[in-house]
Amino acid sequence: MRLMPVRFDLTLTLFLGIPITAIIVLWLFRKESVLSLPGEEIWECEICLGVYIAPEGEKVTRCPFCGSYNKKQEARI
Ligand SMILES: [Zn+2]
């Protein structure tokens, strides 16, 4: 029977590498999702239900789809 240390190394690399890669990918995704909304908020038009992004802190925004104005609402959930 021949020993196969290379195969052991490969197994070890996969065993350690897959979780580390997964963590890095998840971390990058999380960072990107945070960076995609710097100072911006997602709005939903009350008239046409279109979803759009407006600067954070705006009390009234104009829907880019139908042109109607939307007022800031308290959390609706
Ligand atoms: Zn609209």
Image: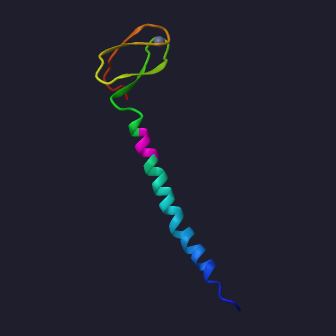
Which of 45 and 37 lies nearest the eye of the viewer? Answer: 37
Query: Can residue 11 be found in the magenta stretch?
Result: no
- Give the x, y percent position of residue 35: 39, 37
Lateral position of residue 59 relative to residue 51, left or right: left
- Give the x, y percent position of residue 25: 49, 52
Q: Is residue 58 above or below residue 21?
A: above
Q: Residue at x 46, y 45 (%)?
A: 29
Main secondary structure along the magenta-highlighted residues: helix
Quadrant containing the N terminus in the rendered view: bottom right
> Residue lying farthest right?
1
Q: Residue at x 45, y 48 (%)?
A: 28
- Give the x, y percent position of residue 6: 62, 79
Q: Is residue 3 above or below residue 69?
A: below
The image quarter containing residue 34 is: top left
Marks counted in the figure total: 0
Span highlighted in magenta in the image? 29-33
> Residue lying farthest front?
6
Quadrant containing the C terminus in the rendered view: top left
Q: Is residue 36 above or below residue 23?
A: above
Q: Residue at x 47, y 51 (%)?
A: 26
Lateral position of residue 62 relative to residue 15, left or right: left
Q: Is residue 77 above or below residue 14?
A: above
Q: Coloured how?
A: rainbow
The image quarter containing residue 62 is: top left
Query: Can residue 32 be found in the magenta stretch?
Result: yes
Lateral position of residue 30 relative to residue 14, left or right: left
- Give the x, y percent position of residue 48: 50, 13
